[in-house]
């Protein structure tokens, strides 16, 4: 039996993936674990490994098409195994029918005969970079995609990567001390000596805000530590379609600038500033974990503009926190070191797939971002303790408030929810960990929708 | 590393390239009775380029042997003499004529030690005046280093200085295998310091003749001088080029070239042989296959001979092989990131 190659789920909320390029041609030999094809998600492009050793046949998806998660896109035959017509899928359907049938409405799906695959009409334009630039970027864990090349036809050269590394490593110096800007020399990076600590430079600009249009009062979303606004998508899918959304990336997170944070108050101030810049209309407010604590602070500071408050496993309601996991996530410079910590987020380790972890690592590939988050973790959670207390703020909550917590939360113990006054509606979800909005988005969205409607 | 730095204490004298080769042959004839010279008109006439000069007067016609006008016959006798224990130095009037002796060089000399299981060796040296620039036209101006470099069993060297010409010839005589020495005709009159007495320049070792960090130029024979001339000009523009004198085509000094490209990230190969399938192709490939690949910061550039016979017309002859302005132009474009 040939082994099915399927479109993997690399993202918790991923329904379909876009095939970017095959690394192996029809009929060629593949080795288990070797790069087989690349897919593009909204966050990043990533490589998918071959699930078995053998020869690749029946390539069903050409580069550029979107394929539903789980759909077969090719088959790997063992060496010597007879290659027949495209086999049926595990579900018993012919592979091509399954691919077409599984397509979500609106998704662009193309089923290609093998012959067509050999000569794809649109060639994937690769990134132009010299071997030296690629090596340097790899060693610095820099994504080449973020660099702009100054060589012929935009080719990224060694000097382009060196300039970027120098820019990121330039320490924030008080005026008049140390070397002048531009004279900071990039220290050589090597694989055996990873770059810890990385110097990073605060960046100018306000927090990154994205919105989803709709009708009525918008829901403002504040993500947790080491997450970003992309993490809300499973919940967004489950929430009412016409509910307008505003997402804020916290400082040094997602697409917001890197900022020096001395403590929780700095972070709250940054959020209030961004909130004030949104206008003066009312919002529903939702925060998760550190974002929950910030939501509590914001609700305390700007109570008149907050219609309702929803908190998912909020921080700030007790001293205990799994500091090792937070530091581990912030520090991890590769998938191998990130995955074990990510698995603490969900109720059970199986909740985080390897592909999900790899996609998460791609979102944290910038060493400057990781260094800034490590510094932030030290300021917020020194010695693995929550150094800020919002129990007084939760006592003062003046708007309708809801709290959702997983009973198997390994990061923040759910009993901290008991710090909330009786007026706060409390939902303790069984079999759910620290990320209920990822682990059970339907239930959480249902609770929030009911809460907003009330 | 050249002979001067290897032997600083040795006395040296200014000599031309041709004089240095004659000096090497004289030393060899004096110290080793098995050494003989063979070739067309190398005796009384003193050689087509006057390299053997008066050696017949000093060592006699028994050891400085004029051979008939048959390269195949002469080379065959030289190979046979080597098999029986002599160390012949066989001179071709032009390297182009080696085409007539390919059977003896490629099928016999290069193979016999291997085919006889090491029971016999062929310590013959073939001296081959080569290269263009003398108005000798298409049949007397070629550069065949890559041809012979393609044959396992042969060693192929290309000295660029009088000191190396002498040192490599003396090293060739100590080598158990046939060694081909390409002597660029334009270099014969070039003068330089040459250590006195016997010394050898190791076969298979390139020399970094100018250190730099911006680009590596690997050149051989006359091209070394054009590369150095270009490098001096580039230095005025702030471009520090590293120049490597290849010296040996087979075996080729991978380590020196790889180390240099790792440092500079840019490679230009300059050679007189036809560009396609030439020495530069081998150097480019060995870099692409090596750990220096990850340090390349621009495409490798090859400057080689035109894909045409060497013309008789002097302007066209110059245009057919790399000249100093060609090297300047390609390095400038490379360093400016235009290629």
Image (cartoon, coloured by chain):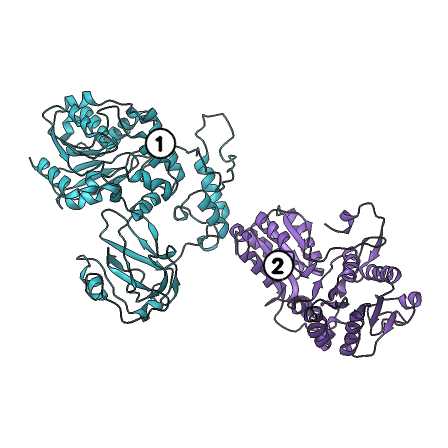
Chain colours: A cyan, B purple
Q: Is residue A412 left or right of residue A25?
A: left
Residue displayed at 52% across by 36% down: A185
Please provide percent x and percent y for residue A301.
20, 24
- Where residue B239 sits in the image (x, y, percent)? 61, 48
User: Is residue A185 visible from the viewing direction of this image?
Assistant: yes
The residue under label 1 is A259
* Quarter holding residue B300: bottom right
Residue nearest the viewer, comparing A219 with B112 = B112
Q: Position of residue A357 (x, y in %)?
A: 31, 44
Dot 2: what SS?
A: strand
Residue A131 on image: x %, y %: 49, 52
Q: Which residue is farthest top?
A: A392
Question: Are labels 1 and 2 on one chain?
Answer: no
Relative to A58, residue A400 above or below: above
Q: Chain of mark 1?
A: A
Q: What subunit carries mark 2? A: B
Q: Residues within 10 Å of mark 2 (few under 14, many from 20)?
A: many
Q: Residues within 10 Å of mark 1 (few under 14, many from 20)?
A: many
The residue that mark 2 highlights is B269
Where is residue A371, by image quadrant?
A: top left
In the depicted view, which residue is nearer to us: B102 or A354? Answer: A354
Q: Give the distance between the C-alpha atoms of the residues marked 1 and 2, in whole angstroms.
A: 49 Å
Label 1 sits on a secondary structure element that is: loop
- Residue name at image x 20 percent, y 32 percent: A313
User: Mark on residue A346?
Assistant: none
Q: Is residue A257 visible?
A: no
Q: Residue visible at 64% across and 52% down?
A: B256
């Amino acid at each position: 039996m040939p082994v099915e190659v399927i479109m993997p789920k690399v993202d918790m909320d991923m329904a379909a993936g876009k095939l970017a390029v095959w690394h192996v041609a029809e009929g060629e030999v593949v080795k288990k674990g070797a790069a087989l094809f690349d897919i593009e998600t909204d966050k990043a492009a990533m490589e998918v490994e071959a699930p078995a050793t053998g020869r690749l046949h029946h390539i069903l998806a050409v580069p550029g098409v979107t394929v539903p998660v789980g759909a077969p896109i090719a088959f790997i035959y063992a060496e010597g195994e007879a290659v027949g017509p495209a086999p049926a899928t595990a579900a018993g359907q012919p592979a091509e029918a399954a691919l077409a049938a599984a397509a979500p409405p609106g998704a662009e799906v193309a089923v290609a005969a093998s012959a067509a695959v050999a000569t794809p009409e649109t060639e994937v334009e690769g990134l132009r970079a010299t071997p030296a630039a690629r090596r340097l970027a790899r060693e610095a864990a820099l994504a080449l995609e973020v660099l702009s090349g100054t060589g012929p036809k935009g080719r990224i050269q060694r000097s382009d990567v060196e300039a970027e590394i120098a820019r990121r490593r330039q320490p924030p110096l008080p005026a008049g001390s140390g070397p002048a800007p531009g004279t900071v020399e990039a220290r050589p990076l090597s694989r055996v000596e990873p770059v810890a600590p990385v110097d990073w430079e605060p960046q100018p600009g306000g927090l990154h805000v994205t919105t989803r249009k709709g009708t009525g009062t918008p829901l403002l979303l504040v993500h947790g530590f080491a997450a970003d606004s992309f993490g809300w998508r499973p919940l967004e899918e489950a929430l009412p379609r016409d509910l307008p959304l505003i997402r804020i990336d916290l400082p040094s997170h997602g697409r917001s600038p890197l900022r020096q944070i001395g403590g929780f108050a700095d972070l709250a101030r940054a959020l209030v500033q961004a909130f004030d810049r949104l206008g003066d209309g009312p919002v529903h407010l939702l925060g998760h974990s550190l974002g929950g604590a910030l939501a509590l602070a914001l609700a305390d500071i700007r109570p008149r503009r907050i219609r309702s408050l929803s908190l998912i496993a909020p921080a700030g309601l007790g001293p205990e926190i799994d500091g090792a996991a937070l530091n581990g996530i912030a520090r991890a410079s590769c998938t191998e070191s990130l995955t074990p910590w990510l698995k603490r987020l969900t109720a059970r380790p199986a909740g985080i797939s390897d592909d999900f972890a790899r996609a998460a690592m791609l979102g944290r590939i910038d060493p400057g971002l990781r260094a800034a988050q490590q510094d932030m973790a030290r300021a917020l959670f020194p010695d693995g303790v929550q150094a800020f207390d919002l129990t007084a703020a939760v006592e003062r909550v003046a708007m309708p408030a809801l709290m959702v917590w997983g009973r198997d939360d390994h990061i923040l113990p759910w009993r901290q929810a008991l710090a909330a006054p009786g007026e706060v509606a409390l939902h303790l979800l069984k079999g759910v960990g620290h990320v209920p909005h990822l682990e059970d988005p339907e239930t959480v969205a249902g609770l929030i929708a009911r809460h907003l409607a009330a | 590393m050249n002979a001067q730095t290897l032997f600083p204490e040795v006395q040296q004298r200014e000599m031309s390239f041709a004089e240095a080769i004659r000096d090497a042959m004289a030393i060899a004839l004096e110290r080793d009775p098995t050494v003989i010279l063979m070739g067309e008109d190398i005796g009384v006439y003193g050689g087509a380029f006057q390299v053997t000069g008066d050696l017949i007067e000093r060592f006699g016609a028994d050891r400085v042997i004029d051979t008939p006008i048959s390269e195949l016959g002469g080379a065959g006798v030289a190979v046979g003499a080597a098999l029986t224990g002599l160390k012949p130095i066989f001179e071709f009037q032009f390297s182009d004529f080696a085409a007539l002796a390919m059977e003896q060089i490629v099928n016999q000399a290069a193979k016999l030690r291997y085919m006889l299981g090491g029971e016999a060796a062929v310590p013959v040296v073939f001296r081959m005046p080569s290269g263009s620039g003398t108005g000798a036209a298409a049949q007397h101006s070629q550069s065949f280093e890559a041809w012979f470099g393609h044959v396992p069993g042969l060693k192929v060297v290309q000295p660029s200085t009088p000191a190396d010409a002498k040192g490599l010839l003396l090293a060739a005589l100590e080598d158990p295998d046939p060694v081909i020495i390409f002597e660029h005709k334009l270099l014969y009159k070039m003068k330089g310091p040459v250590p006195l007495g016997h010394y050898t320049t190791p076969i298979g070792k390139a020399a970094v003749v100018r250190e730099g960090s911006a680009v590596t130029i690997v050149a051989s024979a006359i091209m070394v001088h054009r590369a150095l001339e270009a490098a001096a000009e580039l230095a005025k523009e702030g471009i520090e080029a590293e120049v490597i004198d290849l010296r040996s085509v087979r075996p080729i000094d991978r380590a020196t070239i790889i180390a240099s490209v790792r440092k500079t990230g840019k490679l230009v190969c300059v050679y007189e042989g036809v560009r396609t399938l030439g020495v530069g192709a081998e150097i480019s490939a060995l870099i692409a296959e090596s750990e220096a690949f990850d340090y390349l910061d621009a495409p490798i550039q090859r400057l080689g001979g035109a894909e045409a016979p060497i013309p008789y017309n002097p302007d066209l002859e110059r245009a057919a092989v790399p000249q100093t302005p060609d090297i300047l132009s390609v390095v400038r474009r490379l360093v400016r990131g235009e290629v």
